[in-house]
Amino acid sequence: MINKLTEWGRALADVFMPRLCPVCGKALVADEPYICRGCLAALPRTHLEEVDFNTMEQLFAGKVPIERATGYFYYQKSSPYAQILYDIKYRNRPQMGRWLAARAAGELRNSGFFDDIEVIVPVPLHPSKLAERGYNQSDYLARGLSQALGIPVIDALKSTRAHGSQTRRSATDRWLNAQHTYALRQAKASQIENKHILLVDDVVTTGATLEACTHALLTAPGTQVTLFTLATARLD
């Protein structure tokens, strides 16, 4: 009975305050929590997890040792799908990120991409940025993956200085901006030693942030790092 009342309440709310798909702008129906079925079906999936030495892995080759890397869907600034990232990051919709990450984990599970991953670590925000935004979108993504995979999340990294948005910076500026910005939380070091870590962020473009975070994680003895992002720019 309670579930029925919840469904009726949601349906009533959708009449007076319709929830909209961030991609196409159409009203969502009750069984579409964040994105409409049509836009989900057309999500520009990368399938990079199926490609040996894929373009995302090539981005880090010779810079930092990683095991594997993939992004769930392609990001293009001009694409309507970019609105998903914008909403998650800037419009107080981190739960959409958690939901979509859990969905991604379900799709990728049979590919073997998550095999032997032991802990999940989100890219951190500086405390000043966290206070301003109110949440860390990468942490929500990590929690969604953890929910689907049953792998624990450990906040093993910290941002040691506020570095501002990377959005309008050149590739070189992004790399310079990210250097010496992240460090291992020494109190958490023992929890990731000799572990295969899944490092999680919302999007990869130049790879500067993930590179800096990977270097920080590898200061813990015996660690291995695999990268997952919700989205990735086309890197080829």
Image (tube, rainbow, N blue to C red):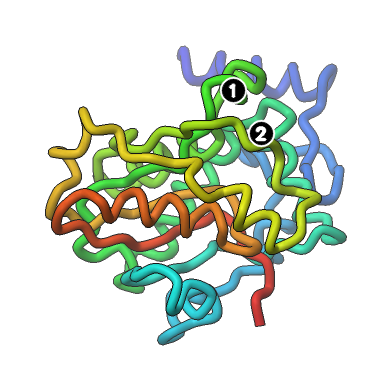
Q: What is the crowding at mark 2: few (fewer than 14 residues within 10 Å), some, or many (at least 20)?
A: some
Query: Up-down: is 2 above or below 126?
Result: above
Task: Name the image quarter holding the C terminus.
Answer: bottom right
Apparent side of residue 79 relative to residue 234 in the rendered image (left or right):
right
Circle 2 — which element?
loop
Apparent side of residue 178 relative to residue 69 in the rendered image (left or right):
right
- What amino acid type is highlighted by mark number 1? Glu
**Residue at (50% x, 80% y) in the render:** 58
**Residue at (60% x, 31% y) in the render:** 162
The front one of 163 and 2 is: 163
- Distance between the alpha carbons at the discs numbered 2 and 1: 8 Å
Q: What is the crowding at mark 1: few (fewer than 14 residues within 10 Å), some, or many (at least 20)?
A: some
Whether the residues at callouts 2 and 1 have beta carbons within 8 Å, the answer is yes
The residue identified by callout 1 is: 7
Query: Up-down: is 216 above or below 157?
Result: below
**Residue at (66% x, 18% y) in the render:** 132
Sequence-wise, the earlier of marks 2 and 1 is: 1
Q: Which label sits on residue 30?
A: 2
Query: Up-down: is 89 above or below 64?
Result: above
Query: Up-down: is 50 above or below 170?
Result: below
